[in-house]
Image (spheres, rainbow, N blue to C red):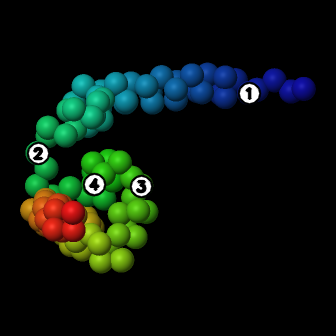
Amino acid sequence: MEKPSRFFRNTVPLFIYAARLVRLKSQQLGAVRPNREVKMTTSRKFPNVRDIADDFNCSTSTIWRWVADGKFPKPFKIGGLTIWDDGEIDSMIDSAKRDRGEAA
C-alpha cells in the first residue's frame, strides 16, 4: 500500500484545525447558537427559512411544503435573500390558536 503524499499528511490536520477554529470563532461571535434558550430570546424581524425551521423544529423542506399548501405565509425576496416577516408568522400562529379554541 502506498503512503499518503507529504502534502496530504501535512494539510489534512491543518484543514481540521481551521474548521475547528472557524466554528469556535463563530460561536464566540454568536453566529452559531449553542442552545435553544439563546436562540428563542433573540429578536429577528426578518428570519430566513433555516431560522424558521429551527424555531418550528422541522426541516426546511417542511416549511416550503407548508408554503405551497397555503398553511404558512409566503416569503418575499430582497436581492438574493428569501425572508419572512415575523409579524405574519405571529399572525398565522395566533390564527391557529383561535381556530383551535373555537373547535374545542
Q: Residue at x 30, y 77 (%)?
A: 70
- Name the N-terminal-most of marks 4 and 3: 4
| Label 2 environment density (alpha carbons within 10 Å; few <14, some 14–19, many ≥20) | few
**Spatial distance from mark 4 to mark 3, Cα to Cα?**
9 Å
- Name the N-terminal-most of marks 2 and 1: 1
Which residue is labeled 2 in the image?
Answer: 43
Q: Residue at x 31, y 59 (%)?
A: 49
**Spatial distance from mark 1 to mark 3, Cα to Cα?**
40 Å
Q: Residue furthest front?
A: 104
Which residue is labeled 1 in the image?
Answer: 5
Q: Please identify, in this view, whether the residue under mark 2 or under mark 1 is nearer the observer.
A: 2
Q: Position of residue 90 (x, y in %)?
A: 13, 60
Decide if residue 14 is on the left or right side of residue 64. Answer: right
Mark count: 4
Q: Is residue 90 above or below residue 20?
A: below
- The amino acid at mark 1 is Ser
For numbered disc 2, what is the local secondary structure?
A: loop
Which residue is labeled 3 in the image?
Answer: 59
Give the quadrant of residue 5: top right
Q: Please identify, in this view, whether the residue under mark 1 or under mark 3 is nearer the observer.
A: 3
**Spatial distance from mark 2 to mark 4, Cα to Cα?**
12 Å
